[in-house]
Amino acid sequence: MKAEIDALFISHGGGPMPLLGDPGHREMVDRLTELAGKLQKPSAILVISAHWEEAVPTITSGTNPSLIYDYDGFPSEAYKIEYPCPGDPMLAQQVYQALDQAGIPARLNDQRGFDHGLFVPLKLMYPDADIPCVQLSLVNSLDAGIHLAIGRALQALDYDNLLVIGSGFSFHNMRAFFSAQTPEIQARNQAFEDWLEETCADASLQETERAERLAHWECAPYARFCHPREEHLLPLHVCYGLASKPSDTHISATILGKKSGMFYWRVETASCAAMETGPK
């Protein structure tokens, strides 16, 4: 048998602003709530957040993780947000084993909570907070190839109706967000978004070419303007590595005045019921 997994790369907006009624996030809020309504409600959610980096991929394995308010300078209500979803130690163990079997050193962490890369979009998509969640870190080298490999390793997961979310942002130049929207900035933003859509969604591309483009994403038009630092793009690499095919759906939204993309894949993974349990 094969497990069916939904993989979704989202542009998650600026800190808690989507939950505070910010008008610059209206389209993003609409797109995420629409997506949640179209997807089958998942049995569990694995989130790769742009806001957690470690020396090796690290997985939350606690039963009831707390929230990490990893932002500054917002109104007091931003620090009272609640999202009391349970953890899923069994899923965390599966993720650990999938990485281990692929030769990727990994760690479990039963103390870390969930950062806003998880709780902000999930509060919009699944406000009841009744779906078990696990968070997976980026690797702090920010090497694109490693994150593609992490995604491919997750193909071994035997967890039906799992939703894997890469929580990042397809445009993440903080200075540009709060600068005047000039035609030049708009053109740079659009050029990179067009390249990203073609790379992820064009079915005529061979998968070797698609993976090569993502591995060398900095060669894309205005790549380093759109991503001076790539941590908000790399969750997409994990999602694509898992899917290893063109995306089924591309969604565009204007967030804080910038064009931003989201991508969805339906994935069938090989059953791995014989996976060992327990870290070595």
Image: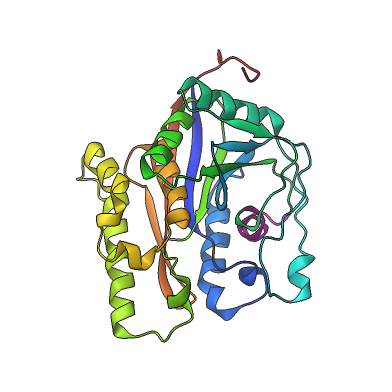
Residue 270 in percent (x, y) is at 45, 23
> Viewed as shown, does residue 209 lie left or right of 231?
left
- Placement of 10 over or under 247, stated as above or below: below
Residue pictured at 33% horizontal, 39% vertical: 245
> Viewed as shown, does residue 85 lie left or right of 250?
right
Residue pictured at 54% horizontal, 48% vertical: 39
Q: Is residue 111 magenta?
A: no
Residue 4 in percent (x, y) is at 49, 32
Bounds of the magenta span?
118-128
For the C terminus, the image quarter is top right
Q: Does the magenta stretch include residue 123?
A: yes
* Colour scheme shown: rainbow
Residue 234 in percent (x, y) is at 44, 49
- Placement of 200 over or under 154, stated as above or below: below
- Placement of 51 over or under 3, stated as above or below: below
The answer to whether any part of residue 22 appears in the image is yes
Residue 145 quadrant: top left
Q: Decide whether the magenta segment is chiefly helix, strand or loop.
A: helix
Camera-side residue: 86 or 104?
Answer: 104
Q: How many marks?
A: 0
Residue 182 quadrant: bottom left
The answer to whether any part of residue 201 appears in the image is no
Camera-side residue: 21 or 209?
Answer: 209
Residue 22 in percent (x, y) is at 61, 78
